[in-house]
Image: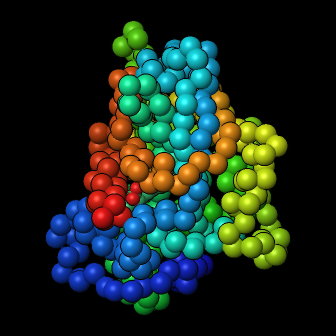
Amino acid sequence: MSRTSLTLAAAIVASALVPVSQLHAETDAETLVNALNAVFGKHDGVRSAHTNGICVAGKFTPSADAASLTKAPHFTAKEPVNVIGRFSMGGGNPEAPNTQKDNVRGLALHFDLGNDSTTDLVMISSPMFIARDPDQFLTLLTTVATKDKEKIGAFFKDNPSATRQGAWLNSHPIPASYSTVNYWGVHAFTFINDEGKKQVIKYKALPVGGEVGLSDDEAKSKDPNFYRAELKEQLAKAPAEFTLTAILGESGDPTDDPTAVWPEDQRKSVTLGKISITGLEDNKTCDAGVFDPTNVVDGIDGPEADKIFPMRSQAYAVSFSRRAQ
Ligand code: HEM
């Protein structure tokens, strides 16, 4: 068994099993959310994934170059656009420790387009997701829920692309803060500019002050929930800023598989603007709805053949309807 699968197995708590008969029969959103609950426990009133999080507010200022790629209103705005954001730890453990190495951090954003309308961007701190499609994700979750190390090891052996995210996280330091790590949109989106020109892109947000990580030893001395106090202290001094970029895809770059990574160092990228997180926001603001990656606007299309992408919208709606009850 790989280190990744061992740590994953150790990190999760199974409370119930999803019947094997459900495997692949219908990988629908309800089944996926049930499977997440089976791995991480069912917790009333909270998200089924990325449960431990902090709501924030700020602004997005588009760059002069963004309009050459897309006519989307937040990328062509003349004035900064208000944003509501949420930083989070991956997984459905409400107390997922901020010191965990093999777990993604999330950054979700609502861009305020006026007239009660928003568009969303949802990113994680690794360039890839753990599963290629909903079937593979369900099999992963149901296998992990068994807590059977042999079965979990066999899954990762049979599904090597599902080991990429864990390997990537384990080879990078633990982020010292939610605001000192890179985030990726993972999926391939298509930008359309006002001349109708199309460009396939992937989002990447880079902290303006650069990445700062902790060694495994440094993390041991930290409180497991240290990100909130750290962020509060930081925001009292200055905004937490990220440069949002579009990595430009080239012919042959996969657009249907969120476990596949483009060779970023060989791709051009364009600065789309600056995300400036200025303060903490009441969690109720973030919990009142969902950050839905499929909530795009004219000038941005989601990936057509990526099966994870539309499933996210459905799964987030299921999670929302349960936590809102
Ligand atoms: C089929 C695959 C996936 C499923 C079933 C799934 C499931 C979920 C669920 C149930 C939630 C909680 C939604 C809510 O209650 O508002 C969530 C949140 C989230 N997911 Fe996923 N997810 C999937 C794929 C992804 C991918 C590919 C990414 C990569 C960007 C991602 C990043 C996030 C983030 C950052 C959040 C937190 C959003 C927030 O702060 O409200 N997820 N996911």
Place of residue 114 in the rendered image (x, y in percent of width and height, measured from the top left):
43, 25
Q: Residue at x 65, y 30 (%)?
A: 274
In this rendering, position of residue 38 left or right of residue 236? left
Residue 101, given in percent of the width and then of the height, sits at 66, 69
Q: Residue furthest top?
A: 195
- In this rendered view, identify the residue nearer to me: 227 or 11: 227
Quadrant assignment for the C terminus: bottom left
**Is 287 placed above or below 5 here?**
above
Q: Residue at x 24, y 66 (%)?
A: 30
Task: From this view, report whether residue 313 is shown above or below residue 151.
Answer: above
Say which quarter of the image contains residue 79: top right
- Please tell me in which quadrant of the rendered image residue 240 appears: top right
Q: Does residue 134 show up?
A: no
Residue at x 82% of width, y 43% of height? 237
The answer to whether residue 97 is above or below residue 193 is below
Question: In terms of depth relative to the viewer, which is nearer, 318 or 258?
Answer: 318
Total numbered labels placed on residues in the image = 0
The x and y percentages for residue 323 are 36, 64
Can residue 29 be seen here? Answer: yes
Q: How is the image coloured?
A: rainbow
Residue 48, percent from left and from top = 40, 67
Where's ligand 1: which quadrant? bottom left
The answer to whether 98 appears left or right of 290 in the picture is right
Residue at 35% of width from left, 23% of height from top?
Answer: 298
Q: Is residue 222 above or below residue 127?
A: below
Q: Nearer the viewer, residue 274 or 162?
A: 274
